[in-house]
Image (spheres, grey):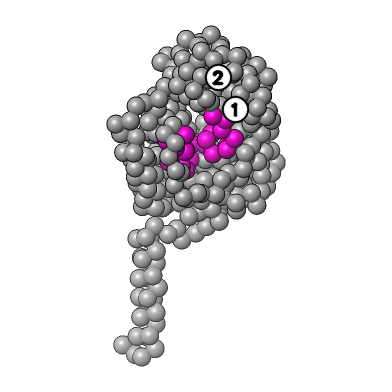
Amino acid sequence: MEHGERRTFYSYKKIFVILLMLVMVGVSLHAERIVTLAPALTEIVFALGKGGEIVGNTKFCNFPGEAKKITRVGGFIDINLEILIDLKPSVIFLYPEYYEKIKIMKKKTKLVNVKHTTLRDLFDGVETISKALDIEAVGKKLILKIKDRLNRVSQKSHGKKRLKTLLIIGRNPDKLTNMFIVGKRDFLNELLEVAGGVNAYEGNINYPNISIESVVAMNPDVILELSVFNEGIKEEKVLGLWERFPFISAVKNKKIKIIKDSLWLIPGPRVSRIAEEMHCLFFGEQLPGKLENSTALPFTPTYEIRKKQGKQ
C-alpha cells in the first residue's frame, strides 16, 4: 500500500470510529426541527439535551429560560397552524387532545402523541420522545434520575402520619363553589402519596366538581389551592372565604396553602420538585436546594383539559 493510500485509509478509519462512538453514546447525526405543544413536552426535550433543536412551542412554555425565546405557536385554544406550517417541523410532540387540531400536518411531519395524566404516562412519554429522537439511552437515564429523587422523598415520608389533603385545581373566583379537585388518577395524587399525604376524595371520578358541603364532609387536614392565582385573587381574600368554615380541620389548624407556581400543573421532569415542596408543606421541613422557579401563568392547557374532564 502506497504512503498516500495508507494515509487515506487511516483517515477514513478515524472518521468511521468517530461516527461509531457517536452512535454508541446516542448522539443523533442530524438535527431535528422539533415542535413541542405543551410545557411538560418542552421540558422533557430540554432535559434530554435536545432543547436547541426546538423551533416552536406554546405560549405557556416558560421553563427553562431558553424556552421563552422560541417561536410560539399559540396554545390549546388558539394554536396557529400558519406559524406551525411555516416552521417546517420534522417532528411534533403533542398531547392526544391536540391531534384533531393539527392532523393536517401528518402528511409532512411526524406526529408523536404523549399521554400526560399519570407518572406512568410521564415515564412512557420520556421513553417515547427519546426513541423518536434516537437517544433512548439518554431517556432511560432521565427516567432513573426522576424515580430516584421521588424515592428519596418517599423514604423521608415513611412512618409519618398521612395528612388527608384536598387538591383544588379550579373554582369560581370569588366563591367556594363549582370546585374542581384532583381525583385518584392524576400525577398530583401520586405525588401527594409520595410526599406523605392521602387524597381526601375517595371517589372514582378523575376530576370531580364538588360543593363546599362535600368539603365539609371530607374534612381535610390540608387544603392546597392550585387555581386561585389564575384569577388574580389576593391571598387574604382566599383565606377569608375559608374562614367561614372553622369546623373544617384545615381551616381550624391554618393548613390552607395557596400555590402560585405553575410548576405544580406540569407533569414533566420536575415532578420530584413538586413532591419535595408538598412534603415540606406537610411537615414543615427545609426545602432542598432551590431550582429555578417557573413563571406563574394566567392559564394552562393542562388545567383547561382537566376542567373539561371534570365536568364529564
Whether tag 1 and tag 2 are in contact, CB under 8 A, the answer is: yes
Of helix, strand and loop, which mostly describes the magenta segment?
A: helix
Q: Is residue 115 visible?
A: no
Region of the chain picked out in magenta, as a range? 257-281
User: Residue 227, which numbered label?
Assistant: 1
Q: Residue furthest left?
A: 159
The mark that comes first in sequence, 1 or 2, is: 2
Q: Residue at x 66, y 34 (%)?
A: 298
Tell whether 265 sits left or right of 15: right
Tell whether 175 sits left or right of 266: right
What residue sits right under mark 2 in the picture? Answer: 180
Q: Is residue 249 visible?
A: yes
**Which of the pair 165/262 is nearer the observer?**
165
The crowding category of the residue bearing disc 1, from other C-alpha atoms within 10 Å (few below 14, some 14 to 19, many at least 20), is many
Q: Is residue 111 magenta?
A: no
Q: Is residue 107 above or below residue 200?
A: below
Element on which disc 1 rests: loop
Q: Residue at x 62, y 39 (%)?
A: 296
Q: Is residue 243 above or below residue 57?
A: above
Tell me residue 111's x, y (percent). 52, 40
Tell me residue 275's x, y (percent). 43, 37
